[in-house]
Amino acid sequence: MTTKPPRPHLGSSSTSNPQSLTALVSLRELLESLSLEQKRNQDLLVSLGFALRSFSNLNRFLELVPVVVSRLVGVEGALLVPFQADGRLWREQLQAIPFQESQELLRQLASFEPAKIVGFGFDESQILQMDRLVQSHLSSAGIFSTSIVSRGIHRGRLYVFDLHKPLVWTEVHRRHVQLVADLTGVALENDLILQEARLHERVDRQLSIGAEIQAQLLPNSCPVIEGVQLAAKCCPAFQVGGDYYDFMPTRPELIGRRREKGRWAVVIGDVMGKGVPAGLLMTMLRGMLRAEVLSGLSPDRILHDLNHLAQEDLAHSHRFVTLFYSDYDPRTRKLRYANAAHNPPLLWKAEQKTITRLDAPGLLIGLQFESEYVGSEVFLDPGDVLLYYTDGVTEAPGLAGDRFDESRLCRVLEECCRNGFSAQKILDRLFFRLDRFVGLDHHLEDDASMVVLKVNESLALPTLK
């Protein structure tokens, strides 16, 4: 029986070698050090990510950026140069460490003239010029820089440097710096979106207030005028519109039954354009017109004077106004009117069962200083219906691409009048047909307003004394 000699242990010679033991310990320490560094870097990036989603104050986040990036790559200094939305250098948000040693560099950047020009940050040659400025100030330091980009737009520049030793650089360092730059870009973009949202909120709030004020300026109900029914409605395309209608007693000092029997002005108009500018001009014209009504002048003279008064304001705004002005006397049933290029109202004559257009020559308000307007008049009979409207009604586009147009409006009006509808029911039916034509899921492209005046069918002409 033979006995095999014992096999030597594979590590016996190395374990007895002191140099090998030292190498193993060093390797273990290196691995532990790398593991700790990796964990530290992960913690730094996590803290920056937490700050990004938690801080509502952009300044607090940007203050962290130079601190985190310098620790990630193990350098002494870091500089963050953010740009404003228009590309100018954002002087108030310049961040750098070490703080004391960087004061002169921050001062030079803040006073850098090209950076004060709109679009500076979008010009590669200008950014290169800024890089040279930083390099000249940190002439003895190693520098690495990268752009902060969000949605393809340059939002800033991030520099890392070491003032007292050479810059040791690896691909991992580059990736870490770029990751911090990308997170900074997200923060700057988020802040820009937040500021825009707040601006829109303020604008929406102001528009809501403007719409509320304008709604208060339009009559919230129709007045009582002896012998007639009235109904009116305005549907603005935006929150604030340029359509206008009004009912004004020519003698506001009268009260009660005397006011109901007095002469009333009925007016409808449209400022060219939509939204806030049109609404402001409409409000201005309303005040002017209400003052003119008190003069007791004829409709053509009132439009003439209004054109003179509004000429300068409308000329500066490059806008014009269409306006149909009429006044109705319930004692005589006479309607006097004049037109400043507005859509002529439609008159249904109950006895003849026909619809005619009430029109008179006249230019737009604000188009020409010396404009002449022609007055006319018509007597209304029991059952007659007068429809005032703006071009937002007839120009409303349908689902098939055609317009509501005047002929369709006449057909609906005739149908309502033949059925003996009240003024309110006529108005409701007209808007119902308009909404159905446009589509329930679609909005009007322009403000649409209508006023219906119907003479009571049982009315007997009063005896004049």
Image: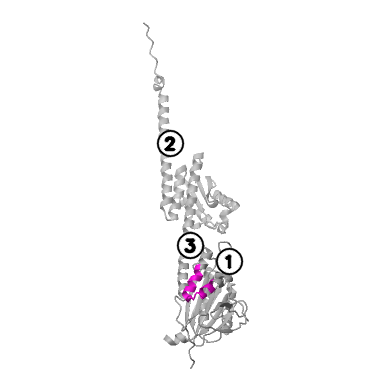
Label 2: which secondary element: helix
| Residue at the image position 47 percent from the left and 78 percent from the top | 230
Magenta stretch?
Answer: 412-432
Q: Is residue 301 magenta?
A: no
Label 1: which secondary element: loop
Measured as percent of width and height from the top left, residue 338 is found at 58, 81
Mark drawn on residue 99: none
Q: Give the residue pinned by disc 1.
A: 403
Mark 3 is surrounded, within 10 Å at the Cα level, by few (under 14), some (14 to 19) or many (20 or more) other residues, namely few
Q: Give the residue pinned by disc 2.
A: 34
Q: Nearer the viewer, mark 2 or mark 3?
A: 3
Q: Give the residue pinned by disc 3.
A: 200
Q: Are marks 2 and 3 in contact (CB under 8 Å)?
A: no
Residue 312, located in which quarter of the rendered image? bottom right
Q: Nearer the viewer, residue 355 or 90?
A: 355
Residue 278, located in which quarter of the rendered image? bottom right
The amino acid type found where label 2 is placed reads Leu
Name the quarter where the N terminus is drawn. top left
Q: Examine the rendering and report whether any part of residue 107 can be seen.
A: yes
Q: Nearer the viewer, residue 127 or 407?
A: 407
Q: Nearer the viewer, mark 1 or mark 2?
A: 1
